[in-house]
Image: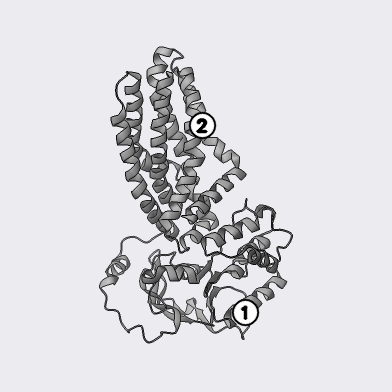
Amino acid sequence: MRPGFNYVTIRTLLAGNYPTYGSATSMTDALLEARELGCERDDRWLFRGLSFAVREGELVQIEGRNGAGKTTLLRMLAGLYWVQEGQVLWKGASREQQSVDFAEQLLFLGHRTGIKLSLTPRENLAFWCKLHGEAPESLQKEALRKVGLKGYETVPCHQLSAGQQRRAALARLFVSQATLWILDEAFTAIDRAGVSELEGWLSDQRSDGGAILLTTHHPIPAGLLDTRINLDELRA
Amino acid sequence: MNAVWQVIRRDVTLAMRSRQEVANPLIFFVLCASLFPLGVSPDADFLRPAAGGILWVSALLATLLSLDSLFRADLEDGALEQLVLTRHPFFVLVLGKVAAHWLLTGLPLILLSPLLGVMLFLPQDVIAVLMLTLLLGTPVLSLVGSVGAALTAGLRGAGVLLSLLVIPLYVPVLIFGTGAVEAAMQGMPYNGQLALMGGILLVSLVTAPFAAAAAVRISLSA
């Protein structure tokens, strides 16, 4: 539940009048930048004073025990959750000023994927493409093949396994032009072969100059990982 | 505009794959209206003057019944998050969802109403007026209801709360809708009521999608 109208809320409301400390020049190469982020739930700070930047070609992993606020942090960065304290900057300016660019450059995959169970993987992907920028049908077909759903394109998703449903959502990675991927629990329900495939896709995105921000309990290979943020250390 | 069309198409496709959910409010509408001849009186002298009110209240309750699922399913499986994160203004996509809701409940209710009108001894020319009021009124029910549905989408067992939020806002449409039918029945002009209903429709068309979009964002933040 949302906390009541306490001093955090009041500070958030007043945030517009706060002097903006440090001009945006310090980290101009950062795609997404978090400044002094704080999140309070049930009168407890999940994290506070959290600052970091995600640059092009970087993979950032958020770590923390269950309930540490990983999902909340990712939702806050994607703009789905209300920023209680601090700022989120996109390419050095506020997200609101460039909301269209932010929306076009962001691919967010939550642990609830938005796959409609009564639609087929092909229909799910086609609808997603229609709203998130067009992708030709051949590319969509290729994406479903890459995630291992060849032969299942026209089977309703409720007949697929949890891992296959997850893969149907992951097909978006191949049709999207987004530079920043935010993946929450990216490896859930994916089989062992799929995990190494997914690592390969993450690596490709990183070497193509894209940025990735993810949470997972799965160990990321050292060569792939650029920054690790541990929320447990930040608890106030 | 294309995005709105895509949302409408998706919601209609989804509804066609679980037809039970589309049929439920319609069955409710028919049952609710048929209880009055059984429960009060099958007499034409009672039913004819009451028919407009009976059909309007039944349509209102049937719409209310269908509202709860408007955003809930999309919230629970994460589809709503994906809609919020597109480059399209979110209220436009909400308008698409409301339009789909009207196509799946409001429109069938309008098409069913003459049948029930005949059952309740409504004269033919009054049935036409009733359909006209429903045509102007049911989009308002969907639009205003979407705000309530968006606010309660994240809550468990929100059915009663949704009714409490939305029914008071339905009162004006109900009054003018039944008023127009009443006036037509007595051979009086009813274009005043229709004009007011048209006004209510326009006001809710330009305000409700914004309110519902804001409410969805609140539901996502909970």
- Secondary element under disc 2, as helix, strand or loop, is helix
User: Which quadrant would residue B175 be assigned to in this image?
Assistant: top left
Nearer mark to the viewer, of 1 and 2? 1
C-alpha gap between disc 1 and disc 2: 54 Å
What x and y, as percent, mark residue A135?
58, 65
What x and y, as percent, mark residue B70?
48, 47
**Amino acid under disc 1:** Asp
Locate the C terminus of chain B by quadrant.
bottom left
Query: Relative to B45, is A221 on the left or the right?
Result: right
Circle 2 chain? B
For residue A204, the mark is 1
What x and y, as percent, mark residue B126?
40, 22
| Front residue of this view, candidates A126 and B167 | A126
> What residue lies at 44% left-to-right and 32% top-to-bottom?
B59
> What residue lies at 60% left-to-right and 40% top-to-bottom?
B19
When the figure is inspected, residue A106 is found, relative to residue B84, above or below; the finding is below
- Secondary element under disc 1, as helix, strand or loop, is helix
What x and y, as percent, mark residue A152?
71, 58
Query: Relative to A36, is B5 on the left or the right?
Result: right
| Front residue of this view, candidates A46 and A201 | A201
**Amino acid under disc 2:** Phe
Q: Which residue is mark 2?
A: B28
Query: Relative to A232, is A125 on the left or the right?
Result: right
Circle 1 chain? A
